[in-house]
Amino acid sequence: MNTKSQELFERARQVIPGGVNSPVRACKSVGCDPLFVARAKGSRLWSVDGQELIDFVMSWGPLLLGHCDPEVTAAVHRAADLGSSFGAPCEGEVGLAEAVRAALPSMDMVRMVSSGTEATMSALRLARAYTSRDQMVKFHGCYHGHADSFLASAGSGLLTLSIPGTPGVPADTVKDTLLADYNDLTNVEALFKEKGQGIACVIVEPVAGNMGLVLPKKGFLKGLRDLCTQYGALLIFDEVITGFRLGLSGAQGKYGIVPDLTTLGKIIGGGLPVGAYGGRREIMQRIAPSGDVYQAGTLSGNPLAMAAGIATLSKLATLDYAALEARTLAFATEMKAVLEGKGLPVSLTHIASMFTLFFTETPVKDFATAKTTNADLYSTFYAGMRKNGVNLAPSAYECAFTSFAHSDADLDQTLEAARKVAF
Ligand code: KE4
């Protein structure tokens, strides 16, 4: 007898590519069919078949307050009663932009868009216009959304040559995308020595969350800052994950580095579609209509999304990030011990309220070492935990997220679920 989730997935696959609206949700890499979710509240979600699960995906990062936070939900309800979209400026856009700037002073001006992808593609266009240069440096294993220029993989021969990472991206589009290894400054120095006057920007996840969690080595971010300053390139911090996750001042506050541009998403929308990019006034003023660099969006600054974002950031400002960080570290450390107790190789990376358990003995410091994780073991872990009522990311190369809604009882129950997984 098929479950309702299976029936929905079968229907979905008839009308939606792969049955999902974003590939990772299909759970292909962990060999399962996706669970269709009926509702969620706090730290938990319920499948359409009524299975209750403690959630550590949390919509891939936005829900630092937990699902269906009362204040956020009430703010969205109030906004919905006033109109869903105006196609004209509204007060919420000003409020959220001011709240972002108050937390991230490097973002002296902010433009709202509707996704992280829009934020990074716009920031890249702006950096190219502002510097009158075309080349961009990005890092293996870092993900900045699905705009063509970012979908590059290592080309033949040199690590730095790019070829399209997917069909549909013309080779010409990624010829200006230069690739380097995360945490390897010598790579980047060599690129700047060779191509420095052609490089518009370096874009980096200051804490990488898309190859699993990888932390910046001491000096890496400062080195990028110094090289960009030396060669007149812009440093773009892609803080779509880390913004308001690592603390109110994100990775730039934690590491004390001032980027020229920052991209945001996820948490600033509180679960509704919001992205943003921003930086120094002299750079941002180049964006239309104040400047000549075009960027637009029908639903940019949507009033419901702005209301969710303002409510989220307002509430986060009252909460104890350090306490959540300590609880998350203790939990992830205990989870590592449970898995090691089963004779498994485990390497843990943790920061703030996010972590990744890699099934490898190798300390993970870049994409190459992240790929030493045993994906089969992860798939077994994922499936066992889901059966035991815990929702983990359906990929070995993502992060687990806790939230202010995860109770100690939730974390204890999750550890108990892990103890029961048979490998
Ligand atoms: P979106 O276009 O998905 O809102 O944001 C793209 C993006 C940009 N920058 C960083 C650092 C990101 O992590 C993302 C998106 N993150 C993935 C998960 N790690 C989204 C999940 C998905 O693609 O379904």
Image (cartoon, grey):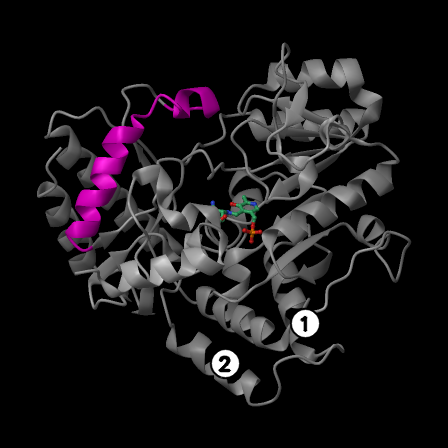
Residue farthest toward the top in the current orientation of the protein: 157
Left or right of residue 373, residue 309 in this image: right
Q: What range of the chain is rendered magenta?
A: 364-389
Specify the quadrant that holds the N terminus.
bottom left
Q: Between residue 173 and residue 262, name the one nearer to us.
A: 173
Q: Amino acid at mark 2?
A: Ala
Tell me the tag on residue 93: 1
**Magenta portion: prevailing SS class:** helix
* Residue 370 is one of the magenta-drawn residues: yes
Name above or below for residue 92 compared with residue 133: below
* Residue 93 is one of the magenta-drawn residues: no
Instruction: Indicate the secondary structure of the residue bearing disc 2.
Output: helix
Residue at 52% across / 67% down in the picture? Answer: 272
Instruction: Indicate the secondary structure of the residue bearing disc 1.
Output: helix
Q: Amino acid at mark 1?
A: Glu
- Of labels 2 and 1, earlier in sequence is 2
Residue 129 at what x, y percent from top left? 86, 42
Left or right of residue 252, residue 422 in this image: left
Tell me the tag on residue 75: 2
Q: How many marks?
A: 2
Mark 2 and mark 1 residues within 8 Å of each other at the beta carbon: no
